[in-house]
Amino acid sequence: MSHWSLDLYLEYLSGLSPPEGSFEAEGAWEHVYDVFPIYADLHLTGQAWSRQHKGMLRLKRTPLPGEEAFRLEVESEVTFLGWLPTRTQRTTASVKCADDRLATPLSWELESVALSAEDGSPVALSHMRESGVREDGAVELVFEGGRRTLEVSSPLTSNWSLFDAVQRLPRGEAPGAEFEMLEDLRLRRAHQRLTAEDRTEVTMGGKSVPLYGFRQIGEGISPTHYWLDEQGRLLLAFGKMRAYIWHDGVTASTQGD
Amino acid sequence: MAMRAGKRTPETKKLTRRQLLQAGAVGAAGLAAGAITPVSMPSGSRSRSASSGPQRPNILFINVDQLGMEPIGAHGCTDVNTPNIDRLAGEGTTFRESHCADPICCPTRASWFTGRMSCEHAVVYNNTPIRKDLPDLGRWLRDRGYEAVHSGKWHVPGRSLPNSFDIVYGEHWDGEYADESVVRAAEAYLRNRTSSDPFFLVVGLLQPHDCCYWAGPYGKPPANQPYPEIMDKLPALPPNFNYEMAEAQLAKQQGSHRIGVKGKSVTEDWSEETWRYYIWSYHRDVEMVDAVVGHMLEALEDSGCADNTIVIFGSDHGEGHGRHHRILKEYLYDEIVKVPLIYSCPGRLPENQQDTGHLVSGVDLVPTVCDFAGIEPPPDQRGRSLRPLLAGNRTEWREFVAAECFIAGRMIRTPQFKYITYKGDPVEQLFDMKNDPWEVENLATESRHSSVIEDHRKLLAEWEATLKPAPEAPGLPGE
């Protein structure tokens, strides 16, 4: 019997090959996730979650020796195939994160562009580039033609940083203190808290895979669950309407259709 | 029935009913003080070189989906944290008697962009196509010198958006997944544009609509909320959670009742804890979109265009969240038909105003935007320009607002009363909104209110006589 929060994903996970081999969360790694909007296709296909409107998240971690920090390369695509000329919002970021419990974002460069989902061409006027630096109690954003100071509280993390941080947290032990999350390095989500989940297991590729996890609750987010394998890899992260699922590099993107 | 004065119109003169109805039909020019003239505004930090005449303002219309009037900090809700919408309200005027034209997504959006009622534009329910000959606000402004740009939710069926707007991010149905992408694309447009034409930028955000899916026909809310750490944070149930009242058959079938499967309401088995968890969860959706709205407002400021941009914030309809024992929408109680509406342009429009007196409607958007843009609105507008109210001018104002719902439903809201009827259904409802704001006591059957209900029936009949229903508008099944 798997944890209740995994019900929607059991069938899909069963068709995935589980990652193999050792994993060192503190070292260098690269993960790719398929990103699904949940429930978006219900009235069209009856499926609980869409296999059609799919995005992607790639995270690559590189330790920075001697700096008590690491670099997190982010590549994110959000695609929704609606009734109109469709767009993919593509965001790339290079984030220097502190090697602390929440992978605090210290500085970053971020670039985004909207692409035509049909042919991948950039949409006019959609390109944007900005950088950010976290200083005491604030984040300084710099973009072409201006700058903006965002007041933030401590501890601070980002949604992408958390994907790293939960892999380094002791199992069954979540940090007790509240923190602030800068979603997509921009949206302030205050009063966040992590709680450790009970262990559970799922079936992937015919094998039983033990999982441990955390959940995040706070302002401006839906409760978000993080599930990791015994090696500490984050396999699955989902809120109410968005799921990041481990991309095994083997399974066809339309699996389950 | 006395006409209620707005905060900034201390003296009003009551018009005849016929005058009021005509005023609705002719739009802003009928009663607003003075002729339509464009707002004269200094340029933002990016220069604008209008070819002639006073510079026309940019318009940024941020719309959200399923946000009622109530769950906003600036409106007194303490269970939700909405600093960005609150800030916008503080920098402008929030209309506390704002009503959608139809409490269903597609119809109300079609009314926003055409200025016509549902029976006229033919979008009487979700996904029924709009009348092809009606102009929409995007195309109307684009043809008159505006750069019309759209990002995000549109949901006006049958109207090809590219014919009316340039699109920077497309339609989506999932706020948590895509709302921030909608704003990023809109932000990039603001930062990169070089045109000297003013813009009409529509940013369509989906949240807090995500609640629809979570607890809808396919969603599976937990029998009891599964997070012990929030038990003491769950909001209380509203005073009208349990109520006994006759309702029209169609009204009974809407909201959470309509989406039930096998004749069973989705919420039938919900525990009190599940209801409270739903409300708690809805509030998180509201906060989610509040942050995205904040990003959009900051992007406007960063673009250098803020000084010359009128920001309009609105919602297509509200959400049940436990009121009248319902979730979702598609009925005519206040939690659904009353929607936030904020106009802001610091330095040019009054700040920190709460207009608690004037009854305003979703069909007012077209005449208001056209008024600010200095152009005539399309013909047969049913709304009026809010510009005189925003300017604090003395203005005769309408005596009532009307709304339609699911083909047969009609609402007439006057300053004190709300009248609800569904064509072909004998049940009528009348609420004293001053003394019964939670709408739990139906006065329609009380003889002492017979003249009031008769008066509202007449208002409705006369209002409907001014409309031009679309022949292609679908009727009720069996009609």
Image (cartoon, grey):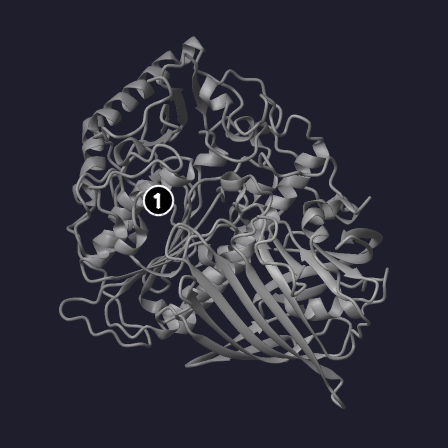
Residue at the outermost bottom position: A66
In percent of the image, x 31 and y 52: which residue is there?
Answer: B161
* Residue A195 visible (yes or no): no
Name the residue that disc number 1 marks.
B156
Please give the name of the residue rendered at 49% of the width and 18% of the height, measured from the top-left corner: B247
Is A129 situated left or right of A13 in this image?
left
Chain under numbered label 1:
B
Residue B329 in the image: above or below residue B305 = above
Q: Position of residue B415 (x, y in %)?
A: 37, 31
Q: Nearer the viewer, residue B230 or A202?
A: A202
Split into 4 quadrants, where in the image is the N terminus of chain A?
A: top right
Q: Position of residue A114 (x, y in %)?
A: 43, 67
- Front-most of A125 and B81? A125
Residue A132 is situated, as x and y percent measured from the top left of the image, at 56, 79
Q: Give the amino acid at mark 1.
A: Val
The quadrant in which residue B202 appears is: bottom left
Q: State which quadrant residue A87 falls in.
A: bottom left
Q: Look at the image and tell me whether residue B65 can be seen.
A: yes
Classify residue B71 as left or right of residue A69: left
**Residue B223 x, y percent position in the rendering:** 73, 35
Crowding near the residue tagged with mark 1, few <14, some 14–19, many ≥20 C-alpha atoms within 10 Å = many
Q: Secondary structure at mark 1?
A: loop
**Left/right of residue B387 with respect to residue B64 in the rendered view:** left
